[in-house]
Image: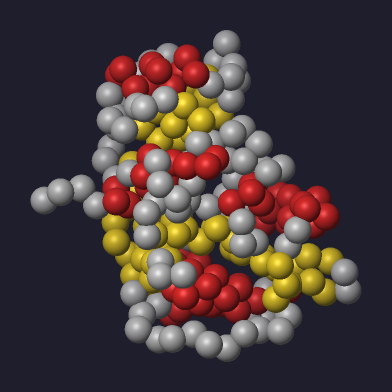
Amino acid sequence: MSPHILDNPAWNALTSGNKDLALGTDEVKFFPEDVSPFAGLKQFNEKAFYELFNLISNDRTIIVPSIHKLQIPVYWKIIKEVVALQMIYNSSEVITKIDPRIVSLAEKDIPQMIALTELTEPGPFLQRTIDFGCYKGIFSSGELVAMAGRRMHPYNYIEISAVCTHPDYTGKGYARSLMNDQIRKIANEGNIPFLHVRDDNKHAIELYKRIGFTVRAEMNIYVLQKED
């Protein structure tokens, strides 16, 4: 059986839908440090890990996702290993309803976007993560209280990411509305939504299942640091 595009999502994203943001070589690619920590390797071997090590800046943290368990060379410091569920939208429902509370986020909103992600910890969100595009949010009295956007774009798959709601505003359906907005737009572009969620985040997993996502695979997420 040939590999699925999403078995190696970072590499396939950096060589297709996100290639405008890609740095690196023909064998190793990664996003700019202020956009995303994700890196992709064409082949998960010693040569590629060593090439990545020499390409990135000292003390930079890199995230490498793979469907396979990887042998990480000893010159990398392993900060964390996370098992995540990779879920794909698998519903025939056509989403047409638009929530009028949802607005597009822009440069002026970056400080609030970073503050919200620091509070809720949906995953890495940096100063230029907005460059992935299509970030949307909901405000209350001028405060950003919920948001969702995009990240990796491998071929005809687009990852929904940074789905988060301020703790004081949970239970209002904001996350579901923002997810549906992203799904509708991605599907209208002829693409397939997918996402990653920690396997122990039961609340989020159940929400995503209710929306129409199904689990495709368990993914191994390696958080690595290059030490000077």
Task: Report x, y in % for residue 30.
Answer: 49, 33
Relative to 67, say whether 211 is above or below: below
Q: Looking at the rendering, in which quadrant would you find the C terminus?
A: top right
Taking the image as shown, residue 92 lies to the left or right of residue 99, namely left
User: Where is residue 127, by image quadrant?
Assistant: top right
Q: Between residues 131 and 69, which one lies in front from this camera angle?
A: 131
Q: Residue 41: which quarter of the image?
A: top left
Would residue 18 be visible to someone looking at this image? yes
Residue 183, x across and y down, in percent: 49, 73
Q: Residue at x 40, y 77 (%)?
A: 212
Query: How did the renderer colour the structure?
Result: secondary structure
Residue extending furthest top?
228
User: Residue 155 placed where, x, y %?
Assistant: 37, 54
Residue located farthest toward the left when viewing the structure as drawn: 1
104 and 124: which is toward the camera: 104
Measuring 32% from the left and 52% from the top, which residue is drawn there? Answer: 6
Which residue: 36% across, 27% down? 26
The quarter of the picture where residue 137 lies is: bottom right
Q: Is residue 128 above or below residue 225?
A: below
Q: Residue at x 73, y 72 (%)?
A: 103
- The answer to whether residue 119 is visible is no
Q: Is residue 63 left or right of residue 165?
A: left
The image position of residue 173, as x and y in percent, is 63, 80
Q: Is residue 12 above or below residue 87?
A: above
